[in-house]
Image (cartoon, helix red, strand yellow):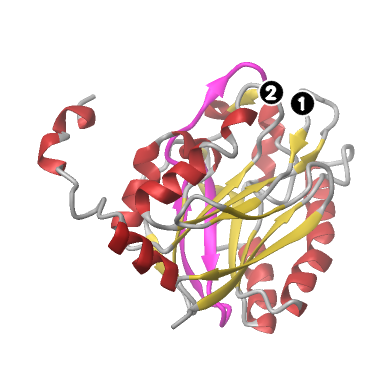
């Protein structure tokens, strides 16, 4: 018997490139509101926003002014998003810049349940610091909460943020912890890693017998213009087949119906979890 969950991504470009940090942040939130409402009107049950959805990808430079955009989680933005979650009976994955305390910041995704309640958060585990324009260690402390799984109104979900997708241990931990759908909110530009965008996560979906939703923003952000965010947000099924994919350039809501019954069917055929030998893998866990 089918168990369908309607899921969606919002992929969006940054509408404001000048002004104060607070003005830039609010402009992006305002751009998202009608898109969130569109998802709600389409009866989306689980909606994922892009990495640090309320601003530009400021890691293209190293400037302490962007610390101003960090906030507690739960906090003002999660409370605003909770109103829409409750209004539309829609689970929301809300990636923000978290201030744990003064001077300690994380790249975080909050999970809000369909009744508007706050379920918890995931902090990005692996933090890149690479040329060109991914100076994330300047902004983020590595996550310290592991890979939590959230029992939402519709499914068990897990989150791994952007760069985490390059580490197969991330998806494996989430799947072993019981996640049925993995969400990967990202900020990724054309170039070095684009060829991996539709390679890694379909492979991880197969290896773990899960659905994965990969989310990426669109557009070129000033003043840095270090690359084009190429969108192409998608959902992939446990057989590794991409079900739906967004455009490379457009702000849009990308929707797919996921039949979670497929997870059991695929795992019964490919017994990867049964045949694991974790007692033999100790060496890969050494520093």
Point out the image quarter for the C terminus. top left
Judge whether 120 appears above or below 191 on screen. Answer: below
Q: Residue 88 or 16: which is nearer the viewer?
A: 88
Q: Any mark on residue 227, and which? A: 1
Is label 1 in a helix, a strand or a loop? Answer: loop
Query: In which quadrant is the N terminus drawn?
Result: bottom left
Q: Where is residue 67 in the image (x, y as percent from the top left)?
A: 64, 38
Residue displayed at 63% across by 73% down: 82
Residue 102 coordinates in the image, percent (x, y): 53, 42
Q: Earlier in the sequence, mark 1 or mark 2?
A: 2
Place of residue 219 in the rendered image (x, y in percent of width and height, measured from the top left): 82, 38
Question: Is the residue marked by circle 1 packed among few (<14), some (14-19), or many (20+) residues within 10 Å?
Answer: some
Of residue 52 and residue 164, the one placed in the foreground of this image is 164
Nearer the observer, disc 1 or disc 2?
Answer: 2
SS of the residue under disc 2? loop
Local packing at callout 2 (Cα closer than 10 Å; few below 14, some 14-19, many 20+) is: few
Q: Is residue 107 magenta?
A: yes
Report whether residue 53 is seen. Answer: yes
Whether label 1 touches label 2, CB < 8 Å: yes
CA distance for labels 1 and 2: 8 Å
Task: From the viewer's side, name the closer residue of 274 and 21.
Answer: 274
Q: Is residue 108 left or right of residue 156?
A: right
Q: Residue lying farthest front?
A: 269
Q: Residue at x 70, y 75 (%)?
A: 84
In the depicted structure, whether residue 232 falls above or below residue 252? above
Q: Name the residue under label 2.
A: 191
> Residue 112 in magenta?
yes
Q: What residue is at 55 percent from the left and 52 percent from the top?
A: 241
Residue 124 badge: none
Range of magenta residues: 105-132
């Amino acid at each position: 018997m089918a168990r369908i969950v309607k899921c969606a991504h919002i992929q969006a470009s940054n509408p404001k490139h000048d002004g104060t940090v607070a003005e830039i942040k609010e402009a992006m939130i305002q751009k998202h509101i009608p898109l969130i409402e569109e998802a709600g009107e389409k009866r989306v049950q689980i909606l994922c926003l892009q990495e640090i959805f309320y601003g530009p990808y400021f890691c293209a430079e190293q400037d302490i002014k962007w610390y101003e955009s960090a906030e507690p989680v739960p906090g003002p933005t999660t409370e605003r998003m909770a109103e829409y979650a409750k209004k539309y009976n829609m689970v929301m994955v809300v990636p923000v810049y978290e201030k744990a305390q003064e001077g300690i910041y994380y790249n975080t995704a909050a999970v809000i349940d369909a009744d508007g309640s706050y379920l918890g958060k995931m902090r990005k585990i692996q933090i890149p610091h690479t040329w060109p324009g991914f100076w994330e260690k300047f902004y983020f402390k590595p996550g310290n909460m592991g890979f939590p799984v959230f029992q939402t109104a519709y499914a068990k979900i897990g989150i791994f943020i952007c760069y985490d997708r390059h580490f197969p241990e991330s998806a494996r931990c989430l799947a072993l912890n019981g996640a049925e759908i993995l969400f990967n909110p990202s900020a990724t530009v054309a170039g070095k890693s684009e060829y991996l965008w539709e390679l890694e996560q379909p492979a991880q979906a197969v290896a773990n017998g899960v659905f994965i939703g990969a989310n990426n923003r669109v557009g070129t952000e000033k003043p840095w213009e270090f690359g084009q965010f190429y969108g192409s947000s998608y959902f992939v099924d446990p057989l590794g087949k991409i079900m739906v994919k967004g455009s490379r350039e457009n702000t849009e809501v990308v929707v797919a119906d996921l039949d979670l019954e497929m997870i059991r069917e695929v795992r019964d055929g490919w017994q990867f979890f049964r045949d694991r030998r974790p007692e033999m893998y100790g060496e890969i866990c050494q520093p």
